[in-house]
Image: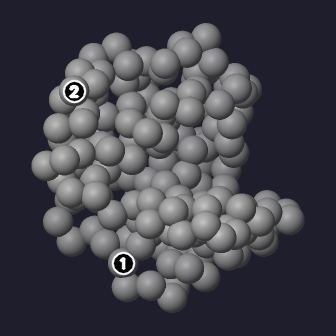
Amino acid sequence: MGRKFSKYILWLMGWNTSGALPEGINKAVLISAPHTSYWDFVIGRFTFWAIRVNIRFLIKKEVFFFPLGILLRKLGGLPVERNTANTMVDQVVRMFNEHESLVVVITPEGTRQKVDRWKKGFYLIAQRARVPIALGYINYRNKTGGVGPIIHPSGDYEKDMKIIRDFYRDKVARYPERFDLSGK
């Protein structure tokens, strides 16, 4: 999708963009939060087109049937097996090792419903693939989406998560009651 067209669609919806991936970062796990609505995907997809971040997202391979599979691939979908958490992490690490350039979007909540804790898969993938974590966001308070800071996993999950939590603290979800950072 074209950058100008995406910016125009966002403008029609009253949204703005902010930030992008820094020059030279061609591989990253881009977490996207808060994630409480189907609209997050729509706004996020247009946002990343508008700021020229070529994102890919993980989706179970069973939905890649004709003709839906064609559309999903065009939008950035990557088919994955969803058997166990470890194989998912291994699959994505393998993808990073096989590509020169790859930015994979992961919603660490793992669902649009309220959760007590984020899934650690995004962190494990970034750590094992030796790629940074980009902090993508959608903020319904000021209708802005984009990319914030870049985190290089230190191996100290709790320390890195404090930095991540602090960044997302002022981001407002479409359904704020479903976004809770207290246990993450």
x, y percent for residue 19: 20, 43
x, y percent for residue 149: 30, 45
Q: Give the residue number, with chain letter if any, for mark 1.
A: 101
Q: Residue furthest left?
A: 4
Residue 165 visible in rendering? no
Q: Label 2 amino acid?
A: Leu
In this rendered view, identify the residue nearer to me: 134 or 173. Answer: 173
Query: Compared with residue 21, is residue 44 higher up or lower down, i.e. above or below?
Result: above
Looking at the image, how many numbered discs can be counted on the residues?
Answer: 2
Q: Quadrant of residue 53?
A: bottom left
Label 2 crowd bin: few (<14), some (14–19), many (20+), radius 10 Å: few
* Rendered residue at 32%/45% (across/down): 46
Mark 2 or 1: the one toward you? 2
Query: Compared with residue 46, is residue 75 higher up or lower down, i.e. above or below?
Result: below
Q: Give the residue number, with chain letter if any, for mark 2.
A: 12
Left or right, 31 with respect to 87, comes to left
